[in-house]
């Protein structure tokens, strides 16, 4: 415990170390939020302004009328249209010419959509009209089937306006319960979430700098402290274990602060599987720590060079996992899949993707297992290297 506390004090007195493991992920997360939040707001699907000419033909198409009322309900957050009802065609044309609406519905013998230009909103309006007409056709088939059944049974079939209204209300309820066109731009396809996944992966791997520092302090060829430790009667195994545990505790503190900042300050929503996200961050931190220990024991160089190597390896791994471009991970998976299988940053981000997109945990546990295997292999090899190191003189 004494060595553990002593190692923690040494780590927290290193200002450069504190910057890279604590401050830099928070600063980068702030930049991500500033860069990508406006992009998502601009891509959200707004309500589409349309006009409907209220004539006798429109009133007689009860299904069409009820469907558009359901899709224009202001109380429904997923409502698709902002509908304006006009009595004359000239009024609708005037609004269309002034760009107050993107199109209008005019019912003669058949419903007709009139637009000024082509675009995504015009396409949605056209697709909506086609869907409603298909539903109307289905209802007509049901009516004909019911009439045929009534004739076969010798029962009079009363085709009243109330029957049409009931059928229309059934269609209205169907549209209100589940719209066939939904805006999922902000809740399911988030640039910001993808970037924050890679940010957490980067923060986990930056813990390797802590692991490297803790090992360097006990290596006699790296510092005067290491020389004194090498000739001390203290168990080297206890020294290594306490130093590594102190580094891991400091790293977990940094991850914890990053989560607090992104959740309560940047308002990042990690979903309803947060305990699994914590588990993945914990295992990812262990992988990052093992990477630092491995580089510290195998690379014969000074602190600055080892730190540079860890940062370079971490940033390369984050780049391949999609930090600098969200399509990069897909490109690597398609062309060189073995790279992402060996890349701990990709394992971490893939674990987040599996929690975000899949209902099962098979892929998540596979990534957790891969990270544990990665960490154990590097730690095992590092311990082997430390045991076989000898020095003629320092």
Image (spheres, rainbow, N blue to C red):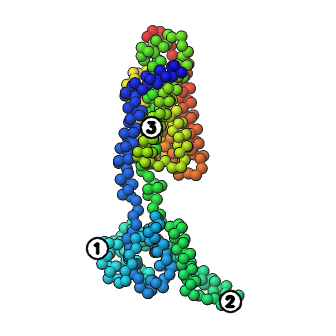
Q: Are marks 1 and 3 in contact (CB under 8 Å)?
A: no
Task: Determine whether 77 is above or below 190 in the image.
Answer: below
User: Marks 1/2: CA distance?
Assistant: 55 Å
Q: Residue furthest right?
A: 153
Q: Is residue 204 above or below residue 379?
A: below
- At 45% from the left and 41% from the top, the residue drawn is 260
The nearer-to-camera label among 3 and 2 is 3
**Pointer 1 or 3: first along the chain:** 1
Residue 189 vs 108, above or below: the answer is above
Q: Which residue is mark 3?
A: 257
Q: Nearer the viewer, residue 331 or 270?
A: 270
Which one is earlier in the sequence, the residue at label 3 or at label 2? Answer: 2
On residue 155, the disc is 2
As drawn, is 100 to the left or to the right of 389? Answer: left
Horizontal side of 193 relative to 143 (left or right) equals left
Identify the mark nearer the N-term, 1 or 2.
1
Residue 245 position within the rendered picture, expressed as x and y whole percent measured from the top left: 52, 26
Q: CA distance from mark 1 to mark 3?
A: 52 Å
Q: Quadrant of the N terminus?
A: top right
Residue at image point 45% right, 9% down = 393
For residue 195, side relative to residue 275 (left or right): left
The residue mark sitting in front, 1 or 3, is 3
The residue depicted at 34 percent of the width and 79 percent of the height is: 92
- Mark 2 element type: loop
Q: Residue at x 38, y 47 (%)?
A: 33
**3 and 2 marks in contact (CB < 8 Å):** no
| Mark 2, other Cα within 10 Å: few <14 / some 14–19 / many ≥20 | few
Q: Secondary structure at mark 1?
A: loop
Which quarter of the rendered picture does the C terminus lie within?
top left
């Amino acid at each position: 415990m004494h060595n553990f506390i002593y190692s923690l004090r040494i780590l927290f007195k290193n200002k450069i170390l504190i910057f890279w493991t604590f401050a830099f992920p928070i600063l980068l997360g702030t930049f991500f939020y500033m860069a990508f939040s406006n992009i998502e707001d601009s891509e959200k699907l707004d309500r589409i302004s349309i006009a409907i000419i209220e004539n006798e033909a429109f009133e007689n198409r009860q299904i069409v009328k009820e469907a558009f009322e359901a899709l224009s309900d202001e109380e429904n957050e997923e409502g698709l249209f902002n509908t304006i009802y006009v009595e004359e065609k000239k009024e609708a044309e005037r609004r269309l010419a002034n760009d107050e609406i993107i199109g209008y519905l005019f019912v003669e013998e058949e419903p007709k959509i009139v637009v000024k230009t082509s675009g995504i909103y015009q396409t949605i309006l056209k697709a909506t009209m086609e869907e409603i007409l298909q539903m109307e056709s289905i209802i007509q088939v049901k009516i004909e089937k019911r009439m045929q059944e009534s004739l076969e049974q010798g029962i009079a079939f009363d085709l009243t306006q109330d029957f049409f209204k009931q059928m229309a209300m059934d269609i209205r309820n169907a549209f209100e319960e589940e719209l066939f066109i939904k805006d999922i731009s902000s809740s399911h396809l988030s640039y910001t979430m993808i970037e924050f996944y890679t940010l957490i992966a980067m923060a986990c791997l930056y813990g390797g700098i802590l692991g490297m520092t803790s090992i360097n302090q006990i290596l006699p060829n790296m510092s005067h402290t290491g020389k004194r430790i090498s000739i001390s009667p203290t168990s080297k195994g206890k020294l290594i274990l306490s130093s590594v545990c102190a580094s891991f505790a400091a790293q977990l503190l940094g991850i914890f602060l990053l989560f607090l900042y992104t959740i309560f300050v940047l308002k990042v929503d990690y979903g309803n599987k947060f305990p699994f996200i914590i588990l993945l961050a914990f295992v990812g931190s262990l992988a990052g720590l093992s990477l630092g220990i491995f580089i510290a024991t195998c690379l014969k160089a000074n602190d600055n060079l080892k730190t540079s190597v860890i940062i370079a390896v971490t940033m390369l791994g984050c780049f391949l996992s999609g930090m600098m471009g969200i399509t990069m991970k897909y490109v690597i998976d398609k062309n060189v899949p073995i790279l992402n299988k060996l890349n701990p940053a990709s394992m971490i981000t893939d674990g987040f993707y599996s929690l975000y997109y899949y209902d099962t945990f098979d892929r998540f546990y596979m990534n957790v297992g891969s990270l544990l295997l990665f960490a154990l292999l590097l730690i095992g090899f590092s311990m082997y290297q430390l045991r076989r190191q000898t020095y003629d003189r320092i």
